[in-house]
Amino acid sequence: MIKVGLVGCGRISKKHSEILGNNLVKGITLSAVCDIIEGKAKILGEKYKVGHYTCMHEMIRDNEIDLIVVLTESGNHAKHVIELAQYGKNIIVEKPMALTIDDADSMIEACQQNNCKLFVVKQNRFNNAVVELKDLLVNKKLGDIFLGTIRVRWSRDQKYYDQDSWRGTWKMDGGVLTNQASHHIDLLEWLLGPVDSVFAKSKTALVDIETEDTAVVILNFKNGALGVIEATTATRPKDLEGSVSVLGSKGTIVIGGFAVNKIETWNIVGQEQQNLDHLNENPKDVYGFGHIKYYNHVVDVLNGDAKILVDGFQGRKSIEIINAIYESIETEKEVFLRFKPNKCKLGDRL
């Protein structure tokens, strides 16, 4: 049995603790929880009858923990992963794995030096329709890909940002691109391949925060395809969609729903229309069902039955794209990847 310690008992911890605390995945269970705000840790600890702590180091010392799950503020992910790597335990970190490229590199290095695996949460890769689309692309069933698009049209009002002082700040969070759309940016890169350059515009439309709540991005992929990112948390009155579209010379696929969970279009040249109901999912929220599948994957990896799908190097790719996007927003210029951030405000420690 893989025993898990959760670090951070905020909003996303509910999803992780439900799965681990209720033993919804065979071979893995919740052992302890930690948050610097004792009340948050106590609520989860008492609910699932596990120890609760305000110090993550004390939690590790007091418990036989095999896997640490870091769910703290985005801007603290790097700091906490690097500190925890010293224990040689395998680590899961929620998205985004870090805010800066340098921090992502430091996390990867710390885990390598301490011989621990670093998993980055990208649960949408496990959605039924997404898995099928990836298989089509790997086997060239859609021909030459010339356009990929993601749309994140979600709703986050002022109350959401006011829940915690770090939300919507450059130092600790970033905006819709870093937070809500990071999963979809990862999907676009995973499906279409490496990005060559980006050009972006953004604005803060409906809430009072430092960062953006709305952005559009044009991407050039190394394979010659173009990409478009449309991301906003200013959709009103509720979440509308989280979607990905891929257009190729032999077909068009659109996966929509509000969590990349529902097939909207599945047209392939020379292929009769199939019954694809088995690929559709109906989750209750934007998190979807991917976390359960994600934890099944983690168990398989730790048991030696699978190769890790999203490690630190994979997680770093979307961080570099997001940093390039923010650099483009500030400079009002096209930014080529493999760059050194200069104007990007994300992760600003000043």
Image: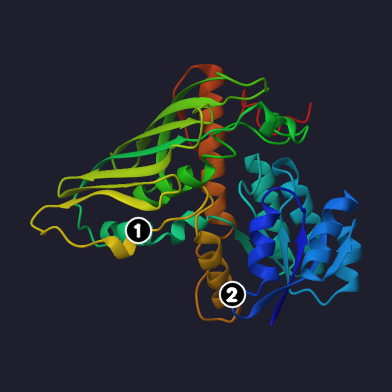
Q: Quadrant of residue 31?
A: bottom right
What residue is drawn where x is 57% and y is 34%?
A: 323
Query: Relative to 283, does residue 318 appear above or below in the rendering?
Result: above
- Identity of the amino acid at label 2? Val
Residue 147 at x, y percent in the picture: 28, 38
Residue 85: x %, y % from top left:
77, 62
> Residue 44, position in %: x, y?
79, 60
Judge left or right: residue 248 versus residue 217. Answer: left
Which residue in the protein does label 2 denote? 25
Left or right of residue 50: residue 117: left
The disc label shown at residue 280, or none? 1
- Distance from disc 2 to disc 1, alpha carbons, whole Å, reads 21 Å
As shown in the figure, which amino acid type bears the numbered disc 1?
Asn
Secondary structure at badge 1 equals loop
What secondary structure is found at the residue carrying circle 2?
loop
Residue depicted at x 58% and y 68%? 295
Query: Residue 165 occupies which quadrant of the picture?
Result: top right
Q: Quadrant of residue 173?
A: top right
Image position, residue 35 (x, y; %): 84, 53
- Taking the image as drawn, is residue 86 in sight? no
Inspect this view and state whether residue 166 appears.
yes
Q: Earlier in the sequence, mark 2 or mark 1?
A: 2
Q: Nearer the viewer, mark 2 or mark 1?
A: 1
Q: Nearer the viewer, residue 211 or 50?
A: 50
Image quadrant for the C terminus? Answer: top right
For label 2, the crowd category at 10 Å Cα-Cα, with few meaning under 14, some 14 to 19 and many 20 or more, is some
